[in-house]
Image (cartoon, rainbow, N blue to C red):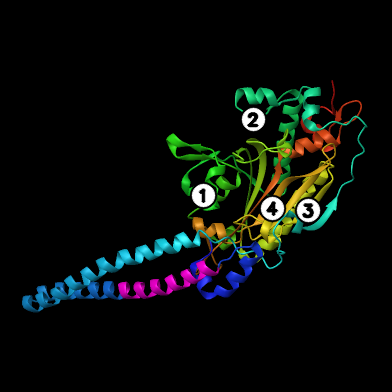
Amino acid sequence: MLSLKYISENPGLVVNRLKVKNFDAAGIVDQLTSLDSERRKLQARLDTSQSTFNRLSKQIGNLFQQGKKEEAEKIKEQTVLLKDQIKQLAPELSGIESRVKELLLQLPNIPHETVPPGSSPEDNLLVREGGGMPELPPEALPHWELAGKYDIIDFELGNKITGAGFPVYKGKAARLQRALINLFLDSAVNAGYTEVIPPIAVNEASAFGTGQLPDKEGQMYYINEDNLYLIPTAEVPLTNIFRNEILSYNDLPRRLTAYTPCFRREAGSYGKDVRGLNRLHQFDKVEIVEIQHPERSYQSLESMTSYVEGLVKLLGLPYRIILLCGGDMSFHAAKTYDFEVYSAAQKKWLEVSSVSNFESFQSHRMMLRYREENGKKIFPAHTLNGSALALPRIMAALLENNQTTEGITIPPALVPYTGFEIISS
C-alpha cells in the first residue's frame, strides 16, 4: 500500500509512474488528495476541540476546589458544546479515513524507474542467460510420460485421492524431491539465511499484510470454520513474522528461508500449458525473504537474483533471467526478475522463480518499521522475496533434460542428497 503522505506530496509522479503498469491512477489520486485536505482540516478542528475540552475540564476542577461554583458551571456549559462537537467530528474523520484506505488499496505499487513499460510478456527484457542446451535422444519424452515410464510420479492416483493438480511422487522421484528441498535449504543457510519452519495456514491479517487479500482471495484455499487461508507461498508467513514490529537499525537486514508446501487454486488455468507438473494446486517450494533498509534494498535485489542464478547453475539447467515490464508485474512489486529454465522435451521455457523488491508497499500494510540509527525516527522497511526454488518445473526440466537411453541421470550436486545417480527401469 502506498502512503497517503507520499501520494499527497507527489501526485503527478504517482500518476505518471503507474502508467508504466498500465494503470490510470489520476481519478483515485485526485480523490485522495481532496480527501487528505479535508482530513487535515477535520483533524485540526478535532484536535483543537479536544485540547480546549481538556483544558477547560481541568479548569473546572480547579474552580470547584476554590469554591467558585458559579464560574465553574458557566465553563461547564462550554464543555458540553465541545463534547457534542467532538462526537460529531470523530465519526466524520473516521469515515474519511475509511474511504482513504479503500482508495489506497486500489493503487498498485509504483514501479522502479528501471522497469520498462509494456503490456505483456513479449515486452519483458532479457537480462542474461546461461547453461547449455541438452542434446536429447530421438525418442525423448515429456516429463509426464517419463513419470509413467519409470513409475515415479502418478498423476491419476493424485486425481483419485484429491483431484487434478495434486500428483503423487513415488520412489526415486520422492527422494529427488526431498533432495532438491535439502539442497536448496542447505544452500540458503550457507548463504546467511536463517531457516524457519512456519505455519502453512495464515489468518486474514497476515494475508492482508503481504497483499493476498483482498484482491487474490479467490486464488487461495480457504478454511471456512477457522477463517484461515492455506499459504500460496512461504513469503506470507515469513514476512508476517515482522508484522507490527519496530526493528532497530542494527537488526537490518533480516534474512529468512523456509521450505513449505504451497497451495493455489489456479482458477481458470486449463489446456496443454498445465499438463503434468507445469501448473499444480499443491507444490513444494523453498523461499527466501529479506527485510532491508530502503537505501540497500536494490543491492539486495541484485544479490538475491545472483543467489538464485547460482542454484540454477548448480543443477546444470539452461536458464534465462527476465526483467518484467510494468504490465507483466504483480500488483505489489516495484521490480521483479523472473527465472526461466528450458524444458527440452516440451521445447518451452518454464518460469521457476520470481525475485521481487516490494519497497515499503507491504510494510505500510503490516506496519513493519525500523528505527533509524540515532533512535529517534521510525520509517517503513523494505521487503523482498524470491523462490529459491519452486520445485515442480525444476523437477520437470531435470527429468526431461537429463533423459538418456539408459535412464534419467542426476546432476552431481544432487547425488549426495539422493544417494543414486540415475533413475532407470
Q: Main secondary structure of the magenta part?
A: helix
Residue at the spot 82% in from the left edge and 38% down from the top edge: 346
Q: Residues within 10 Å of mark 1 (few under 14, many from 20)?
A: some
Magenta stretch contains residue 34 = yes
Q: Earlier in the sequence, mark 1 or mark 3?
A: 1
Q: Nearer the viewer, residue 403 or 120?
A: 120
Magenta span covers which residues?
26-47
Residue at mark 1 to residue at mark 3: CA–CA distance: 29 Å
Identify the residue position indicated by label 1 in the image: 213
Q: Secondary structure at mark 1?
A: loop
Q: Amino acid at mark 4?
A: Val
| x and y, in percent, of residue 44 in the image | 35, 75
Residue at the spot 86% in from the left edge and 50% down from the top edge: 130
Q: Earlier in the sequence, mark 3 or mark 4?
A: 3
Q: Amino acid at mark 1?
A: Leu
Q: Earlier in the sequence, mark 3 or mark 2?
A: 2
Q: Nearer the viewer, mark 1 or mark 4?
A: 1
Q: Nearer the viewer, mark 3 or mark 2?
A: 2
Q: Is residue 129 found left or right of 107 in the rendered image?
A: right
Q: Nearer the viewer, mark 2 or mark 4?
A: 2
Identify the residue position indicated by label 4 in the image: 355
Residue at mark 3 to residue at mark 4: CA–CA distance: 10 Å
Residue at the spot 52% in from the left edge and 75% down from the top edge: 9
